[in-house]
Image (cartoon, rainbow, N blue to C red):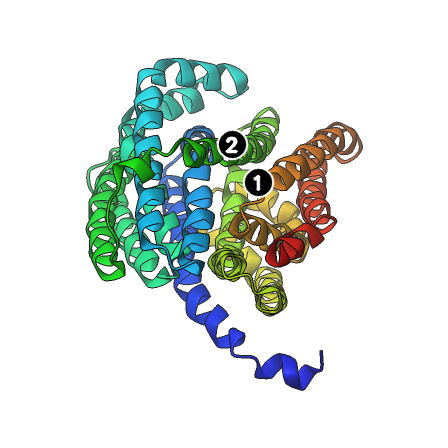
Amino acid sequence: MSLKYFFSRPSHGEVWRLAWPIILSNSSVPLLGAVDTAVVGHLPDAHYIGAVAIGAMMFSFLYWGFGFLRMGTTGFVAQAAGQKDPDEIRAVMGRALLLSLIISVFVLALQSVVLWSALNLIDSSAAVEKGASDYFSIRVWGAPAVLANYALMGFFIGTKNTRAALMIQIFMNGMNIVLDLFFVLGLGWDVAGVATATLISEVSACLFGGYLVRRHLLKLGGIWYRSSLFAGSKLTQLLRVNFDIFIRSILLIFAFAYFTAQAASKGDTTLAAVAVLMNFMHIMAYGLDGFAFATEGMVGSALGAKKPELLREIVLVSSFWALIVATIYTLIYALFGPSLINLLTSIPEVREQANNFLPWMMVAPLISIWSYQLDGIFIGAVQSKEMRNGMIISFVLYMIGMQVFDNIWGANGLWAALMLFMAARGVTLALVYPRVERRATA
């Protein structure tokens, strides 16, 4: 393919049309995390930052572990849209919402067990544990809204209506930031204020998202069929795919949770420094995910329509722009990293430690980009087995790296293992990518 032909393709515009709302909406998520860190980072003790970091990590297990509600919904909706089947789009949405409701009931019923288990797995100070417990006990009541919102976001990405996803995310995170400042700085609620702000925002976003989905379904047309909603073969396929993605997601979240736990074992200052820099990691991840999310809907639609040439073009174009954006992140962290750290915390020892770790953030975008892009491709293709197997291999390599590199480089070894993990995720999926192209011609 010549460069002139490559840059003349209309898919460049399509990728950006879908990606920019996701990049913008996703960027508001780490901005929220940065505000969470900043409002407690300027309180007089480092344990407040650690408490919010540990509390947020608990919800990474609960919510990111159930990320299949978005990923599976996106893939199935996108392929139904490629086949021009509005009835199946409705059925996929209904199944996802039903599953989210069932899961949320279990989350609320088992909340005490989850909290006790999490606190016993993490070696942190008593002050951090107390704050994390307060955070968890408040925010957990947003579980039904959060899980339903995953399904709603999957619907919008699968139907290529990424502007609606932007509206929901901006609404939720904008409200959360305002309430953060009000509850913490205005009322002095510290960690409890951060959790309360998040809870109110999550419930409000779910109600707003439900309204937008209803309006979109009216435009798509189609009819709700109970027989289609509860079709045995469809439910079996949904559960199989979601279980594969669940295993993949749990290992991913455990990897980051283990990273945080290992940092906590090295003291509150190291934990606080890691919490500050994880905002950098999240900013990068959510930005690069914009292209991955755009890829999900486009790949699913191309596969549903059985267009292999379009599939290849989508993969090449989206990956090209994702790499450009990853390079920009690297340059930003290299030039402005110390200033960003200073914005997030005023504690001298935390600043010093975070600056020592900063070089890892400079290389992270260029290492991580391939895992995000390939995740998007395989989610759109609904090829969950490959994602599950690749994550298992990557996780094993990561755990080995954690033990080896920690012994050699100490706290810096934790970051080295994390970079190994991100690289392995990309390589394991790249090796089996040809299976996706074969699906387009089957």
In the rendered image, the quadrant that contains the C terminus is bottom right
Residues packed near mark 2 inside 10 Å, few (<14), some (14 to 19) or many (20 plus): some
Q: Nearer the viewer, residue 254 or 195?
A: 254
Q: Which residue is mark 1?
A: 384
Amino acid beneath label 2: Arg
Q: Is residue 11 above or below residue 203?
A: below
At 32% from the left and 26% from the top, the residue drawn is: 102
Say whether residue 14 is left or right of residue 107. Answer: right
In the rendered image, the quadrant that contains the N terminus is bottom right
Say whether residue 62 is left or right of residue 227. Answer: right
At 58% from the left and 49% from the top, the residue drawn is: 378
Q: How many marks?
A: 2
Residues packed near mark 1 inside 10 Å, few (<14), some (14 to 19) or many (20 plus): many
Q: Is residue 171 above or below residue 404?
A: below
> Along the polypeptide, which appears first: circle 2 or circle 1?
2
In the rendered image, residue 137, in percent from the top left (x then y), is placed at 31, 23
Q: Are marks 2 and 1 in contact (CB under 8 Å)?
A: yes
Q: Is residue 214 above or below residue 406?
A: below
In the rendered image, residue 122, in percent from the top left (x then y), is placed at 53, 20
Is residue 311 at all visible to an observer of this figure? yes
At 52% from the left and 59% from the top, the residue drawn is: 295
Q: Which residue is mark 2?
A: 240
Q: Is residue 181 above or below residue 315?
A: above
In the rendered image, residue 396, in percent from the top left (x then y), is placed at 71, 30
SS at badge 1: helix
Q: Quadrant of residue 310?
A: bottom right
Is residue 39 at all visible to an observer of this figure? no
Amino acid beneath label 1: Ser
In the rendered image, residue 178, in percent from the top left (x then y), is placed at 24, 50
Q: Nearer the viewer, residue 19 or 128?
A: 19
At 37% from the left and 34% from the top, the residue drawn is: 231
